[in-house]
Image (cartoon, rainbow, N blue to C red):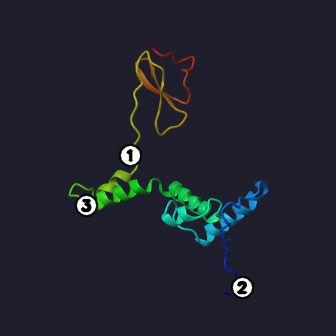
Amino acid sequence: MSGKTAPTVPQQREPGEWPAPDDFAGLWADARTAFYAHDFPPYASHAWRDLHPDDPRRLAAALDAAEKWRKYGDGERLFWELEQISRQGFRADAKTRAELEELRRPHTPHEVTATPGWPPVAIPGRPGWWRHWIDGKQVDLPHRTPTEGHQEAA
């Protein structure tokens, strides 16, 4: 086996033989071994239910199910969505590759307009710059407050 040893999984305990409180570290290690060896029945299957409650393979199956839930979410919902997609087939109103690439292209920032009586407006695409309404004109300044020579008209 090229220097590697096969992972071992501890055997079931006899019914009624419960672990001591200080044995939980060992059970956790045994469950991890079973998890990495993929030597456990699927979570909630008949074989899983037949395992003794303190069998490490029960915990390994629960860990596997929790990890799959974390990665892939609700499996039943995913299967339902895949079934719906397979029933629909290709849709005529689906976007072409060129349309999708056009949607991915960056758009120019929105042009903002300062309004009399309102505070200055931050300019998209120019961090730190503000558009002011000063003496009836749109004026861009690198701050929110007008300088002494520029008073905003209300």
Residue 118 vs residue 141, the one in the foreground: 118
Residue 7 x/y as whole percent: 67, 75
Using the image, determine if residue 108 lies above or below residue 123.
below
Q: Secondary structure at mark 3?
A: helix
Residue 23 x/y as whole percent: 76, 59
Image quadrant holding the N terminus, namely bottom right
Specify the quadrant of the image occupied by residue 20: bottom right
Dot 1: within a 10 Å radius of its alpha carbon, few (fewer than 14), some, or many (20 or more) residues? Answer: few
Amino acid on which disc 2 is placed: Gly
Question: Disc 3 designates what residue?
Answer: 87
Q: Residue at x 55, y 56 (%)?
A: 66
Specify the quadrant of the image occupied by residue 57: bottom right
Q: Residue at x 67, y 71 (%)?
A: 11
Closer to us: mark 3 or mark 1? 3
Residue 86 vs residue 59, the one in the foreground: 59
Is residue 151 toward the left or the right of residue 8 in the image? left
Amino acid on which disc 3 is placed: Arg
The disc placed on residue 3 is 2
Q: Secondary structure at mark 2?
A: loop
